[in-house]
Image: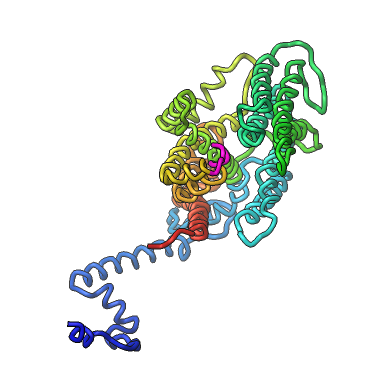
Amino acid sequence: MEEQVAGYVADQQIPSRPAPAGEKGIVQVVRKNLFATPTDTVLSVVFGVFAAWLIWSILSWAVFDATFFGGDREACLTPGEGESEGACWAFVGAKFSQFMYGSYPIDLRWRPNLVAIVFALLVAGAAIPSIPFKSLNTWLLFGVFPIFALVMLTGAGFDVSGGFTAFLMLVAAITAYLLYGDDAGGLAAWPAKIALIGLIACFALIVMSSLDTGTIRFAGITFTIWSVLACLSALVSAVAIAVGMAQRAGVQIWRPVVPVVVAAFIAVLLAEDYGLRPVSTNLWGGLMLTLIVAVTGIAASLPLGILLALGRQSDMPAIRTVCIIFIEFWRGVPLITVLFMAAFMLPLLMPSGVSFNQLLRALVGVALFSAAYMAEVIRGGLQAIPKGQYEGAASLGLSYWQSMRMIILPQALKLVIPGIVNTFIGLFKDTSLVYIIGLADLLGTVRRGFSDPNWITPSTAATGLVFAGFVFWLFCFGMSRYSQFVERRLDTGYKR
C-alpha cells in the first residue's frame, strides 16, 4: 500500500509554471470580469454607458460650463437666456471668507487662523507615529490648547467666580481620587478616606458658595468664604492621596496634586485680561463654528462615554442605574430636541439673573448626546474582552481602575475603533443642526448666502450645497482613512 501511494508523491520541488496564455493581459482580465457571460456583457455595457453619461454630466456642470470668476450674479447667467448652465463657483469665491469665519471681525481673523495652525500641528504630532515627544504633545493638545483657543477666539477676560474655580478643582480632585486612590493604600486606607471626605465637603461648600457672605478678590477672581473653603477642601483631598502614595516606594507622589493645581491655574488664565478685543460668540460662524462644535463634542464624548460604559457594567446598583437612565434618556430623544431644549427651554428653567451662553449650551447638549452613543460602542468592546483578562488582572493584584487603565480598556478600545470613528463622523455631520437654533455653522452660512440678491441665480443654491457637502466629505473621509491606518497599526493579533 505504501509503495502504491509513494508513486504519486513528488520527491522534489516542482518549479512554478507561467499562467496560461489566455489568462494574461488586461484584455483577458476585462473579458473574465466584465464579459464572461452574455448577462455580464449586457450589465457591463448598460452600467458603463450610465457611468460615462454621469461623469460627463458632472464634469460639464462643475468644470466645462461653470463660472469661476465674477463680481455678481451676472457672471453666472447665460447672456440672452437668464439661466445658468453650470456651477457658479464665483459665488463660492466671493463668499469664501464668510463660509470660513461667519461674521467674525475681518481685522481679527488672524486669531482663528493662529488657533487652526496650532491645532493642526498638535494633531499632527499626536497622529503621526514617527514624531517624538508624544507625552508632551498630548499634554499640550488636551491641557493647554483648549485654554489657548478659548482665550484667542473670545478675547478672555471672563468674570470667573470662586464657585466656578472650586468646581474645576473638584472635578480635578475627583479625577485624582479615581486614578490614584488605589496607589494611596486602597480606598479603605485612611488617606483615601480623608480624600473622600474632602470631596464631599468641597461639593457641599460649592452649594453654599451662592450665599452672600462677603467677597474676596484675588487673581481677578471673586471668592466668597464658602468658595475659598471649597477650593481648600479639593486641595486637601489631593494632598491626602499624595500622602498615602508617599508610603509606597517608587511612586510619584506629585501626580494627584497636579490636576488640582492646573484647574486653579486655568481659572486664573480665564479671568486674566490679555488686552485682546472681545468677540461675542454670536459672531462666530462658518467652518470655524462647525469645527469648534465637532472637536468639542468629540473630545468630551469619548471620556464621558468610557465612564458611562464602565458605570453601566458596575456591580454597584446605584451607579449602574444612573448610567442606564442617562444613556437610555439621551439615546431616546433626537438631537434637534436636545438643541431646542438647550437653546430655548433651559433659560426658562434657570433662576432669575442666571444665564449661559447659547453656544455653550449647544456644546454641552451635543457632548452629552454623543456620549450616550459612545458609551454603548465602548460597552460592546468591554463585553468582547474574554473573562480571562479580568481574572488575569485580578491575579496580579491590580485594583479595578488599574486593571481597566492598563489591561482592559486598551484592548476594548482597539476592538471598537470602527464604531468610535463612526460615532465621530456622525457627530461631525450632525453639527449642521445647530443652524436651527440660530448658530450659523458652515451649512447655515452657505444657506444664508443664497438670500444675497447680488448672487441669486438658478445654480447658486446647488453650487453652495455641493461646496458644503464636499467640505464635510473631506473631513469625514480623512477621519475614516486615519481610523483604518490606526486599525492596521494596532492589528497585532494572530491571523487564522
**Residue 398 within the segment the image draws in magenta:** yes
Q: Is residue 426 above or below residue 171?
A: below
Q: Residue at x 48, y 23 (%)?
A: 318
Q: Quadrant of the N terminus?
A: bottom left
Q: Which region of the structure is painted magenta? A: 396-404
Residue 489, position as x, y percentages in the image: 52, 60
> 240 or 371, which lies in front?
240
Q: Answer yes or no: is residue 88 visible.
A: no
Numbered label tally: 0
In the image shown, does 56 or 51 lie closer to the viewer? 51
Q: Relative to residue 281, is residue 418 drawn left or right?
A: left
Residue 35 in view in this figure: yes
User: Residue 193 colored magenta?
Assistant: no
Q: In front: 224, or 427?
A: 224
Q: Which quadrant, please, contains the C terminus?
A: bottom left
- Left or right side of 134 for 306: left
Q: Which residue is more in the foreground, 279 or 366?
A: 366
- In the rendered structure, the answer to whether residue 306 lies left or right of residue 114 reads left
Residue visible at 72% across and 21% down in the picture: 230
| Residue 478 horizontal/vertical position (percent) | 52, 56
